[in-house]
């Protein structure tokens, strides 16, 4: 701002640079709040998942069958999943899980399932490493929030016999409808958890009625993967709502604080105003220049916050992003700030007799 800009821009920049720290703090608050509201809002819109998309969050499975008693005969019409239940590491829990659920599946049945972010997918799971570490794969929500772990990290849990077992994260999946646990190779699982006699889940691509009727005596229940995913999304949307509310309060405070800073600058810059008046500047012209200085800073904060939100949200921008809400909140902040400027300007004119 202290560069020798020509003309009116030079006058405005020199005035802002004369005492930069006080307006800078509020402008950062306003710009940061706009960024938070707009950025979170743009990333919040999510289209309904396509249950037939094998690379999507449902893995191409339409339903999940859960058995209270594991079936001891081969499962027909579903991909069987062995489960060792422990601590839920999904977003439904607030704390960090120390012993997550363990899912096991035949890797050959999971080729092309779910979107891979890094490492290897479920179809590449295999036997333990030479040092005894068991390769596992997890989705990004379970690893990031439930376990505070990432690709290459190792976790120590107890196996079915209570002995320590080292798990090494070799793959990270995108968002899935099967949060809360880590996936390992079926052969390794059955060796480490021999007390698990059969699968507890069945992943079904089509109508689950036949499988449900055949295993009703085992306490079978069916849940669609869309409903399962919606349960996790509800928690995520609640967090997004909190950030939106906090950002909205910041926008309101920033929009109110910048005009108030302009009033304070009129008092602190009394000598500067007197000098301009002695040089022949009309009083209303001086007042308009000082108002324009802070209106320009106000608009700069809104613009920078909006651009930063676009840049940060663009990689994860969903097709159903709520553009109307984001643009509406931005316009509301602009109208609120400009309205306060207008009211204060009129009060100053009336009080000074200009």
Image (tube, rainbow, N blue to C red):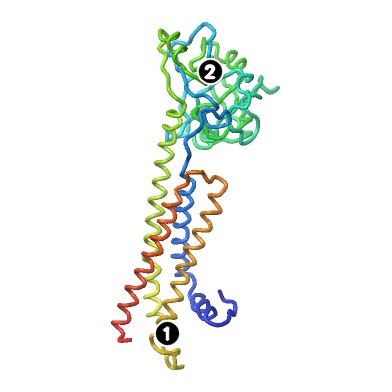
Q: Which residue is rendered at x = 44% and y = 61% of the image?
A: 30
| Residue at the outermost top position | 73
Q: Is residue 175 above or below residue 33?
A: above
Query: In the visual, does 169 lie left or right of 45?
Result: right
Query: In the visual, does 210 lie left or right of 340?
Result: right
Q: Which residue is rendered at x = 32% and y = 82% of the image?
A: 349
Q: Position of residue 258 (x, y in %)?
A: 40, 68
Q: Earlier in the sequence, mark 2 or mark 1?
A: 2
- Disc 2, SS: strand
Q: Which residue is rendered at x = 40% and y = 56% of the image?
A: 329
Q: Position of residue 150 (x, y in %)?
A: 59, 36
- Disc 1, SS: helix
Query: In the visual, does 116 lie left or right of 259?
Result: right
Question: Circle 1 sits on which residue?
Answer: 286
Q: Is residue 127 above or below residue 10?
A: above
Question: Circle 2 sits on which residue?
Answer: 81
């Amino acid at each position: 701002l202290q560069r020798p800009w020509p003309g009116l821009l030079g006058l405005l920049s020199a005035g802002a640079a004369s005492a930069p720290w006080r307006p800078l703090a509020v402008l950062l608050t306003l710009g940061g709040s706009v960024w938070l509201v707009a950025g979170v809002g743009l990333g919040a819109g999510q289209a309904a998942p396509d249950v037939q998309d094998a690379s999507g969050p449902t893995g191409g499975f339409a339903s999940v069958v859960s058995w209270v008693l594991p079936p001891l005969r081969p499962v027909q019409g579903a991909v069987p999943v062995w489960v060792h239940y422990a601590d839920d590491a999904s977003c439904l829990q607030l704390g960090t899980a120390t012993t997550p659920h363990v899912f096991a599946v035949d890797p050959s049945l999971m080729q092309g399932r779910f979107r891979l972010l890094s490492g290897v997918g479920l179809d590449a799971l295999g036997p333990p490493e030479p040092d005894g570490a068991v390769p596992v794969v997890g989705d990004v929500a379970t690893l990031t929030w439930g376990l505070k772990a990432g690709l290459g990290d190792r976790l120590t849990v107890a196996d079915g016999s209570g002995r320590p077992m080292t798990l090494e994260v070799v793959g990270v999946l995108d968002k899935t409808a099967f949060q809360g646990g880590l996936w390992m190779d079926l052969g390794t699982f059955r060796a480490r958890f021999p007390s698990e006699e059969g699968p507890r889940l069945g992943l079904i691509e089509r109508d689950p009625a036949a499988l449900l009727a055949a295993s009703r005596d085992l306490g079978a229940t069916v849940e669609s993967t869309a409903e399962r995913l919606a349960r996790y999304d509800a928690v995520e949307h609640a967090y997004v709502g909190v950030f939106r509310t906090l950002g909205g309060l910041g926008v309101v405070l920033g929009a109110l604080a910048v005009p108030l800073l302009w009033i304070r600058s009129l008092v602190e810059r009394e000598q500067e105003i007197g000098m301009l008046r002695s040089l022949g500047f009309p009083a209303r012209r001086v007042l308009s220049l000082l108002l324009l200085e802070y209106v320009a800073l106000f608009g700069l904060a809104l613009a920078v916050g909006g651009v930063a939100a676009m840049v940060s949200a663009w990689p994860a921008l969903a097709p159903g992003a709520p553009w109307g809400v984001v643009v509406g909140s931005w316009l509301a902040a602009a109208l609120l700030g400009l309205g306060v400027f207008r009211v204060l300007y009129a009060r100053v004119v009336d009080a000074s007799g200009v």
